[in-house]
Image (cartoon, rainbow, N blue to C red):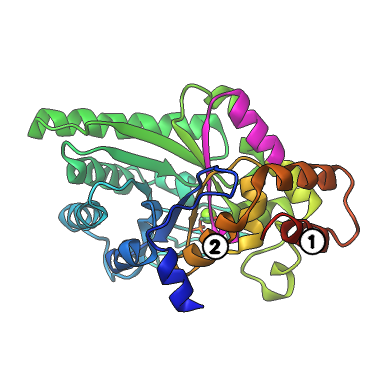
């Protein structure tokens, strides 16, 4: 089976009926980048920059951040990389900074909220990203944006760092793309305000599902109470997809749900053709994609979503096997 995946490495993730799907890698340390070539990924769809903060006793200095981001860009050798800005707080606590005890850390002072309230730390990171890019393209994504205002504020800080770096070094990224992670249901109902402003949106299923089903991803006794392959979750994602299509917002998904071929299949059927996942999933998902008759599957899948069986997951699995998977 392993050898089978290696043979797929240089083949495209193209469905039987000719739709191309891009499969990207989730990474957080530069050594993860070894997997870019080995797994045959199209790029890095989620680089979790907070790992550098979490593995160090002290806050990483500007130069250390620049060096890491530059190494990542060099290793990617021109393939796209999405840098997700620091996602601290919640389940990723920095003892020195996250001092307040919270009743509900997942709902608390975390992610972009935390970054916007620690402007020195945040601006230093944005400066490091811009400096590391030099004159290469740069793609930045903000985590857990809940309101359009948070996106605008974060982007303004990024643009200040672009201007500052240009004035100091004479260099500016040849292309700058700025996106949001969709991790809270609220943002799905603010996409009209983000149309024409964001370059892309990436669904972070880990947080999104915990908020959507009100089931803590870190509590084992409830974390299996949510299922992406369920009518409620998929109807919600269908709404997100339709809104993105209507407003010409490029959409993708990251988060662990994309790691399972059956969930990845559902995303693809809903129009998400850019999926980022752990390295070990790229082979299995690519195999699924290459066996899929997408148009025929999508038709039956959307009908099933309108009239689901009680065993909806089995229904989807049966449709998958009817259509090549
Ligand atoms: C997510 O929430 O789906 C996600 C990708 O972010 P993280 O798992 O790092 O919170
Ligand atoms: Mg998240």
Of residues 8 and 143, the one drawn nearer to the viewer in this rendering:
8
Examine the structure image and report whether residue 165 is included in the region drawn in magenta: no
Given the current orientation, which residue lies at the most extreme left position? 169
Residue 33 horizontal/vertical position (percent): 30, 63
Of residues 210 and 243, the one drawn nearer to the viewer in this rendering:
243
Name the residue carrying label 1.
Answer: 318
Of residues 321 and 39, the one drawn nearer to the viewer in this rendering:
321
User: What label sits on residue 111 in the rendered view?
Assistant: none
Residue name at image x 60 percent, y 59 percent = 257
Secondary element at tag 2: helix
Mark 2 neighbour class, 10 Å CA radius: few under 14, some 14 to 19, many 20 or more? many
Q: Could you tell me which quadrant the C terminus lies in?
A: bottom right
Residue name at image x 25 percent, y 46 percent = 78
Examine the structure image and report whether residue 243 is included in the region drawn in magenta: yes
Residue 246 showing in the rendered view: yes
Residue 232 horizontal/vertical position (percent): 79, 49
Region rendered in magenta: 238-259
Image-based side of 2 in relation to 42, left or right: right
Question: Taking 29 as reference, is 111 above or below it?
Answer: above
| Quarter of the image where one finds residue 97 | bottom left
Dot 2 or dot 1, earlier in sequence: 2
Name the residue carrying label 2.
Answer: 287
Mark 1 neighbour class, 10 Å CA radius: few under 14, some 14 to 19, many 20 or more? few
Residue name at image x 60 percent, y 28 percent = 245
Marks 2 and 1, how far apart at CA: 17 Å
């Amino acid at each position: 089976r392993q050898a089978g995946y290696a043979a797929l490495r240089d083949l495209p993730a193209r469905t039987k009926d000719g739709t191309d799907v891009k499969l990207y890698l989730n990474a957080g340390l530069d050594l993860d980048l070894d997997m870019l070539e080995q797994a045959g990924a199209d790029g890095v769809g989620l680089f979790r920059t907070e790992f550098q903060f979490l593995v160090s006793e002290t806050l990483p200095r500007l130069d250390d951040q620049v060096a890491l981001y530059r190494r990542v860009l060099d290793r990617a050798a021109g393939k796209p990389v999405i840098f997700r800005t620091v996602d601290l707080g919640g389940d990723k606590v920095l003892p020195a900074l996250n001092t307040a005890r919270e009743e509900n850390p997942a709902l608390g002072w975390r992610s972009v909220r935390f970054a916007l309230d620690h402007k020195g730390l945040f601006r230093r990171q944005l400066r490091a990203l811009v400096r590391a890019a030099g004159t290469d393209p740069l793609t930045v994504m903000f985590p857990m944006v809940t309101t359009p205002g948070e996106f605008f504020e974060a982007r303004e800080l990024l643009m200040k760092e672009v201007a500052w770096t240009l004035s100091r070094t004479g260099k500016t990224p040849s292309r700058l793309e700025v996106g949001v992670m969709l991790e809270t249901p609220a943002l799905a109902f603010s996409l009209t305000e983000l149309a024409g402003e964001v370059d892309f949106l990436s669904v972070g299923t880990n947080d999104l599902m915990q908020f959507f089903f009100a089931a803590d991803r870190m509590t084992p006794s409830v974390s299996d109470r949510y299922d992406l392959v369920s009518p409620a979750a998929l109807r919600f994602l269908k709404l997100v997809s339709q809104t993105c299509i209507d407003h010409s917002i490029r959409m993708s998904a990251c988060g662990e749900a994309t790691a399972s071929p059956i969930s990845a299949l559902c995303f693809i059927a809903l129009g998400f053709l850019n999926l980022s996942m752990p390295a070990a999933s790229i082979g299995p998902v690519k195999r699924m994609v290459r066996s899929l008759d997408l148009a025929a599957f999508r038709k039956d899948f959307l009908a099933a979503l309108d009239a689901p069986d009680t065993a909806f997951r089995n229904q989807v699995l049966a449709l998958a096997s009817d259509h090549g998977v």
